[in-house]
């Protein structure tokens, strides 16, 4: 289950940095910038810009007792008389002259850090265009006294574009969640710039408007799955190019041991996320998400489910009377469909209130498609399946493997994928909060697995989507799933 509202609460209450800290940070950075601009710093200061997680809007709340850090880029003019280290030494000199900053300022490798006693750290990073290097931007390393090519502003622009593709700000939200997992579990090492790049590289233009990126839990699951696929292809630390500067390999920030550990963690987390998303039982899904996200996720939300479980155990007549109108059909329709077939279902049956309309336009192709289904009594991916007919009665256990077979496509099949619309009806699904009616991406080649859990007459539809323009090439007739 997605638990969209729980994810939003989790972000707001646990993951996202609070407004009080952001206000404190803004006050501090404004004061620092004004002080430096009015100082005798030895070269012209052009402007300041937030950088890193602050600029990317991926900054998270620190764990209790921990500080948070923020980066500020100080864009300056080149001083022909200075060595690279002088840009940092002179910035430290200026800050040490202030009674406010003298005890806070210290040199780091490429910046001057202001340490606010366990509350926050602010890194100030001088950067400038170098005439002898085609006016490309460089930062300085004070210990090595050398220039380092860097494009922090371009990196921020790249991140903004990737976030537009993912929709609903989900790239940034997922980045914050994975940073929280890194802090909360302390199970892997991955510097933020490398982690953000790895996440962003899993998103492409074809994802715009896709079901896989339609919500935070789906985006998180898709990112982890793709990242797992990428990492599994590498035995050694891979090359991870900085998207704003191809000559920089961010993979060098890892040791081999750190990479292998990260690879193992992502493989495990990907499996947990997929299981949690696919789990149809409310409380079981919560447990599985908490395995990944911690006990704070959906805290206390089981209470409603317990109340619903009590209602679910009442006499069938009482439940049907209370929920028949809201559930899509009265309970006895299952027996009628088993006896007389799906032909008795009226047209309004296929347009219940919880049915989601497709978000893609029709392409004009005259392609067709059909659905077949194989029943697996042992559950998803267990044993050999048995082909079942549309509307055949099935028990409330096991799983169906649906396959869409398109034909008369205008392009090769590889140019298409399938979005599956899964719609449940009946009071059991209603009680469990599992009416669905939404779209779900294929989890195989033109195929998808679905568990059988709830008594009712449900239906599945396949929408064949053309990758090039994200338009519908074909749509199947409903395949009826009758669960006794």
Image: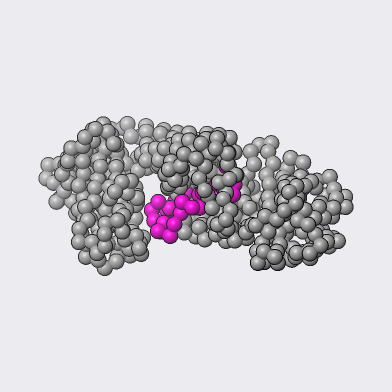
Q: What quarter of the picture does the N terminus occupy? A: top left
Q: What quarter of the picture does the C terminus occupy? A: top left
On the picture, is 166 further left or further right than 101?
left
Q: In this view, does 234 lie above or below 95?
A: above
Magenta residue span: 189-217
**Residue appearing at x 27%, y 33% in the figure:** 382
- Quarter of the figure with residue 77: bottom right
Q: Is residue 79 magenta?
A: no
Farthest residue toward the front? 132
**Residue appearing at x 35%, y 63% in the figure:** 468
**Residue appearing at x 82%, y 55% in the figure:** 90
Residue 153 position in % (x across, y down): 62, 60
163 or 293, nearer to the observer:
163
Residue 482 position in % (x across, y down): 21, 42
* Residue 243 shows in this picture: yes
* Residue 307 shows in this picture: no
On the picture, is 322 further left or further right than 375?
right
């Amino acid at each position: 289950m997605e638990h969209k509202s729980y994810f939003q609460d989790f972000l707001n209450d646990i993951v996202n940095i609070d407004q009080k800290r952001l206000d404190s940070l803004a006050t501090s950075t404004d004061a620092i910038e004004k002080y430096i601009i009015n100082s005798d710093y030895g070269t012209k200061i052009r402007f300041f810009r937030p950088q890193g997680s602050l600029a990317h809007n991926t900054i998270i709340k620190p764990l209790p007792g921990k500080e948070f850090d923020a980066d500020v880029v100080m864009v300056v003019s080149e001083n022909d008389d200075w060595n690279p280290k002088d840009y940092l030494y002179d910035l430290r000199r200026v800050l040490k002259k202030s009674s406010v900053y003298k005890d806070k300022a210290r040199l780091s490798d490429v910046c001057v850090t202001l340490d606010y006693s366990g509350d926050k750290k602010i890194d100030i990073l001088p950067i400038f265009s170098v005439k002898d290097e085609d006016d490309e931007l460089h930062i300085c390393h004070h210990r090595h006294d050398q220039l380092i090519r860097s494009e922090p502003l371009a990196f921020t622009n790249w991140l903004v574009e990737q976030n537009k593709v993912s929709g609903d700000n989900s790239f940034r939200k997922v980045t914050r969640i994975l940073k929280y997992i890194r802090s909360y579990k302390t199970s892997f090492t991955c510097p933020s710039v490398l982690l953000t790049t790895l996440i962003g590289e899993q998103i492409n233009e074809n994802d715009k408007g896709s079901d896989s990126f339609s919500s935070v839990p789906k985006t998180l699951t898709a990112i982890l799955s793709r990242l797992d696929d990428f990492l599994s292809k590498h035995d050694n630390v891979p090359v991870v190019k900085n998207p704003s500067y191809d000559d920089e390999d961010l993979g060098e920030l890892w040791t081999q041991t750190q990479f292998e550990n990260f690879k193992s963690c992502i493989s495990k987390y990907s499996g947990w996320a997929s299981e949690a998303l696919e789990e149809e039982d409310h409380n079981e899904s919560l447990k599985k998400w908490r395995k990944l996200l911690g006990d704070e996720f959906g805290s206390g939300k089981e209470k409603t489910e317990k109340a619903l479980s009590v209602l679910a155990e009442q006499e069938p007549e009482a439940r049907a009377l209370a929920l028949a109108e809201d559930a899509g059909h009265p309970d006895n329709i299952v027996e009628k469909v088993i006896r007389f077939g799906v032909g008795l279902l009226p047209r309004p049956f296929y347009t219940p209130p919880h049915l989601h309309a497709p978000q893609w336009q029709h392409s004009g192709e005259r392609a067709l498609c059909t659905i077949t289904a194989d029943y697996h009594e042992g559950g998803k991916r267990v044993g050999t399946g048995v082909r079942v007919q549309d509307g055949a009665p099935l028990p409330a256990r096991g799983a169906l493997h649906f396959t869409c077979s398109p034909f008369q496509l205008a392009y090769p099949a590889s140019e298409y994928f399938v979005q599956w619309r899964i719609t449940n009806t009946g009071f059991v699904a209603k009680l469990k909060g599992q009416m669905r009616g939404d779209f779900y991406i294929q989890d195989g080649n033109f195929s998808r697995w679905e568990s059988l859990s709830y008594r009712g007459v449900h239906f599945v539809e396949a929408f064949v989507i053309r990758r090039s323009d994200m338009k519908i090439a074909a749509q199947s007739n409903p395949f009826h799933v009758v669960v006794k």
